[in-house]
Amino acid sequence: MSTDVTSSELAWFKSSYSGAEGGECLEVATTPGRVHVRDSKFPARAELAFRRPDWAAFVGFAAGP
């Protein structure tokens, strides 16, 4: 995680595709240089932080052709 912000200071959100029934969801928070990702079921556990270009490449790959 970047040193300029702590996890509790981030504005976390879930995808609009996430249902109210729970399940397997990710939460995302953004800063100018990073995209932070964590498991919504266990928000106190470690998160991942990606540089924005790396996250964009992953999303482009995951979305497929």
Image: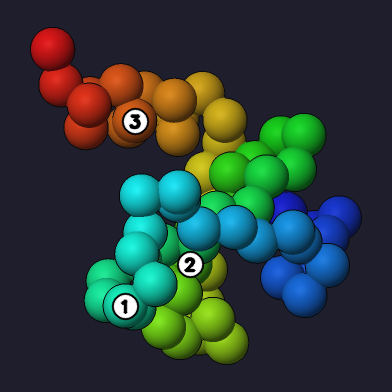
The residue that mark 1 highlights is 21
Q: Position of residue 14 (x, y in %)?
A: 50, 58
- Disc number for residue 3: none
State which tag comes first along the sequence, 2 or 3: 2
Characterize the local packing of mark 2: few (<14), some (14-19) or many (20 or more) Cα atoms within 10 angstroms.
many
Which color scheme is applied?
rainbow
Characterize the local packing of mark 1: few (<14), some (14-19) or many (20 or more) Cα atoms within 10 angstroms.
few
Characterize the local packing of mark 3: few (<14), some (14-19) or many (20 or more) Cα atoms within 10 angstroms.
few
Instruction: Identify the residue at image location x=54%, y=81%.
Output: 43
Q: Residue furthest front?
A: 20
Under mark 3, the amino acid is Val
State which tag comes first along the sequence, 1 or 3: 1
Left or right placement of residue 64 versus residue 45 in this view: left
Instruction: Identify the residue at image location x=65%, y=61%.
Output: 12
Under mark 1, the amino acid is Glu
- Disc number for residue 38: 2
Q: Where, quadrant-wise, is the C terminus in this rendering?
A: top left
Under mark 2, the amino acid is Arg
Q: How many marks?
A: 3
The residue that mark 3 highlights is 59
For discs 1 and 3, the disc positioned in front in the rendered view: 1
Mark 2 near mark 3, Cβ–Cβ under 8 Å?
no
User: Where 50 falls versus 2 (above or below)?
Assistant: above
Give the Cα distance between marks 2 and 3.
16 Å
Res. 58 in view: yes
Q: Position of residue 48 (x, y in %)?
A: 49, 60
Between residue 50 and residue 65, name the one nearer to us: 65
Q: Where, quadrant-wise, is the N terminus in this rendering?
A: bottom right
Provide the secondary structure element on which disc 1 rests. loop
**Image-quadrant location for residue 41:** bottom left
User: Where 45 falls versus 58 (above or below)?
Assistant: below
